Amino acid sequence: MMERTFVMIKPDGVGRGLVGECIRRFEQRGLVLLAIKMQCLSVERAALHYKEHEGKPFYEGLIAFITSGPTLQMVWEGNDAVAQVRKMNGATNCLEAGPGTIRGDFGLSMQKNLIHASDSRETAAREIGLYFSDEEIVSTKSLCPEWLC
Ligand code: CMP
């Protein structure tokens, strides 16, 4: 099903120069980039983004890490985009992420796991709205070529 997902390259991914590698992989898969921006997250925005994790033992460290340097936000569109990107990113813990995934190929850590992507269509809508206005997202009906659907 044609859908959109939100993807964020974390400070470790940006700092290690993996922005191009991640974008290349998503484009190669057939996903289409609809919006992109770069910013250092404020603690307030990071707290909004990760509000479901508030109170968990790793929460403070997660907020400190995600606000520690530049991050890249993107909206990608494609057939089953949410699940496709989650599969391409690999398991949350890089130790469990399979070879061929972004985390499995480039990461070692649970916290510094390079990239974030929405886990459902509902989460994608919420996360896209957290970072992008409608005007910042390419607005043609669908840019995804029909031979990729
Ligand atoms: P992400 O996909 O961005 O969603 C929540 C993030 O919290 C996750 O990736 C990890 O970076 C981090 N995280 C989840 N579980 C743990 C944990 N047990 N210890 C440290 N960080 C975690």
Image (cartoon, grey):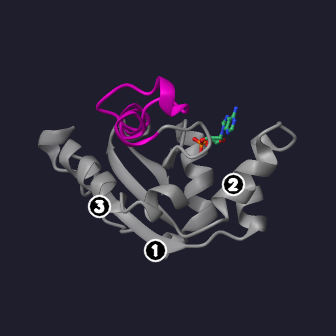
As helix, strand or loop, the secondary structure at mark 1 comes to helix
How crowded is the residue under tag 1: few (<14 C-alpha within 10 Å), some, or many (20+)?
A: few
User: Start and end of the magenta stretch?
Assistant: 83-107
**Three-letter code for the amino acid on which mark 2 is drawn:** His
Q: CA distance from mark 3 to mark 1?
A: 21 Å
Q: Quadrant of residue 85?
A: top left
Which residue was labeled with disc 2?
49
Q: Residue at x 41, y 68 (%)?
A: 36
Q: Quadrant of residue 3?
A: top left
Above or below, 135 relative to 101: below
Closer to the eye: label 3 or 1: 3
**Hey, what amino acid is under mark 1?**
Glu
Question: How many other residues sit within 10 Å of disc 2, few (<14), some (14-19) or many (≥20)?
Answer: some
- Residue 28 x %, y %: 18, 47
Label 2 SS? helix
Q: Say few, some or many: other residues with alpha carbon within 10 Å of mark 3 (under 14 / 14 to 19 / 20 or more).
A: few
- The answer to whether residue 27 of the structure is visible from this angle is yes
Q: Residue 7 in the image: x percent, y percent?
A: 47, 52
Task: Tell me which label, 3 or 1, sits earlier in the chain.
Answer: 3
> Quadrant location of the C terminus?
top left
Q: Nearer the viewer, mark 2 or mark 3?
A: 3
